[in-house]
Image: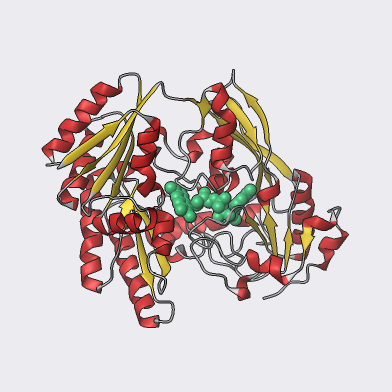
Amino acid sequence: MTYDCGFLAELPLSADQLSFASTAREEFAADFGTTADAERAPDAVVWPERTEDVSAVLAAADERGVPVTPYAAGTGMQRAAVPVGGGITLAMARMDEVREIRPADMQVDVEPGVIGDELNGALESEGLYVPSFPQSAAFSTIGGMIATDASGTKTVKYGEVADWVLELEVVRADGSIIEVGSKARKTSAGYNLKELFVGSEGTLGVVTRATLDLATRPPQTVGGRAVFSTLGDAAGAITDVVRAGIDVATLELIDPLTAEMANAYTGSDLPATPTVFFEIHGRAVDAELDALRARFEAHDAARIASTADDEEMAELWRARREIGHALTEWDPDRELEVVGDVTVPIGSYPTIIAFIGEIADEYGLPIPAFGHAGDGNAHYALLCDPGDAEERERAHEASDRIIRKAIDLGGTCTGEHGIGADKRSHLRAEVGDGTVETMRAIKDALDPNGILNPGTVLDEVDQ
Ligand SMILES: Cc1cc2nc3c(=O)[nH]c(=O)nc-3n(C[C@H](O)[C@H](O)[C@H](O)COP(=O)(O)OP(=O)(O)OC[C@H]3O[C@@H](n4cnc5c(N)ncnc54)[C@H](O)[C@@H]3O)c2cc1C
């Protein structure tokens, strides 16, 4: 589908803020989880520099029924930033100012295109940071994280990105500008619209400013990794550590296949056995470390290495940090077909990890599994030969089985990546028809012409 977007040239945008060129448009036809699809490329790209630019584009597009898809860094896994077919892409990267740091309030005002690690770099001299960014924080944006309600390796202690969002400026589909939330840490003033916009994947409004709550950097940090003989031991140890209330900031699991892939990409020497990475933050880290060691040893941990030295810790963590890229570089003949991020109640973590292994055997497909285990999250990936339709179909069937199992265990089809275009059927299976209809009613109320990122989260409807 293509849309006439010539009206954009009439808006008060400078020449370098607008492009109809195919090279520019094709750049926005893929995200990390998908290969480029020319059919889905936008008809025009706008680079807003101020809230008023976003407002002008939305008001004009809404009047004409032209779809608008926000695109930040494009590191999403679910095609959520890729248009369903044509329309306008709002490329948010230029709205990248850290506007005001207020150390006394432990708050910061940022534009949505700020990269996560760059924000934390700017906060370092104040001894402050946002602790729960995703693993992709070196190259993903605050706006993208808010829109997907991202979380990461430290969520087990510090919660999701949503937990650090205090207030948002949002441009609605008709171009009107509203503020939701409060600079106060708590508010009971009316409906909680802030939470509604967080995680809405650009389908309810465009975030143009965020006020984030900040944490004090921990006085002590100790981290390390432990090696187990079986995945069951590793998953059981993780469950026990969480249940025992040990104050861990991070508990990550990688399986032997993932370790092999990470070694090949980074040159690291992880043993080809299940490995758990951990970090403890606070004032009494040694006591917590002792308690963690005892739990790991009860599950036959073969080796536990730990360090309080930042550089050594970074080295220990390097292989874990690079898994995303290690997967894509693993086999030049294969592409990422599916990246899963199921999340289950912590008591069911060993079950879902074992199930992923059973599915890999049953379908005859290698399925590397890893994830933010401390919050019950299991990532898995299916790599396929793009020319082998049968294998690709088998991969999706295998992933569907894993997702159904997670839902049956009381979990979710997506702990952090979002629904995007790819998991819409799973959303219905997870929350039920009545809840999807309620979401649709909210979408229709806020975006009656259906212009905001149609086909993401909810099915597209004919207008
Ligand atoms: C190697 C790697 C590791 C990753 N690790 C994690 C992880 O640990 N945890 C995790 O949660 N995710 C992870 N991700 C996925 C991804 O990085 C996150 O989903 C991230 O939040 C997306 O940010 P982005 O800036 O790339 O957004 P994009 O991918 O560009 O956009 C994501 C969604 O946000 C919408 N959007 C963007 N900006 C706005 C805005 N201003 N207003 C409204 N909507 C907007 C888009 O329309 C789209 O729906 C990882 C990805 C990679 C490649």
Foreground of the two, 313 or 117: 313
Residue 38 place in picture, x, y as percent: 62, 74
Count of marks overlaid on the render: 0
Residue at the image point whose x is 38% and y is 73% from the top: 384
Q: With respect to residue 128, does 337 lie above or below?
A: below
Residue at the image point whose x is 29% and y is 47% from the top: 253
Q: Can residue 442 be seen in this view?
A: no
Quadrant housing the N terminus: bottom right
Residue at the image point whose x is 42% and y is 71% from the top: 332
Residue 406 place in picture, x, y as percent: 30, 56
Judge left or right: residue 20 versus residue 107: right
Foreground of the two, 189 or 54: 54
The image quadrant of residue 146 is top right
How are the residues colored?
Answer: secondary structure
The image quadrant of residue 160 is top left
Judge left or right: residue 78 versus residue 59: left
Q: Which residue lies furthest to the front in this view?
A: 267
Judge left or right: residue 286 versus residue 86: left
Residue 256 place in picture, x, y as percent: 24, 56
The image quadrant of residue 366 is bottom left
Foreground of the two, 115 or 457: 115
Q: With respect to residue 203, does 287 lie above or below?
A: above
Q: Is residue 98 visible?
A: yes
Quadrant housing the C terminus: bottom right
Foreground of the two, 257 or 411: 257
Residue 462 place in picture, x, y as percent: 63, 71
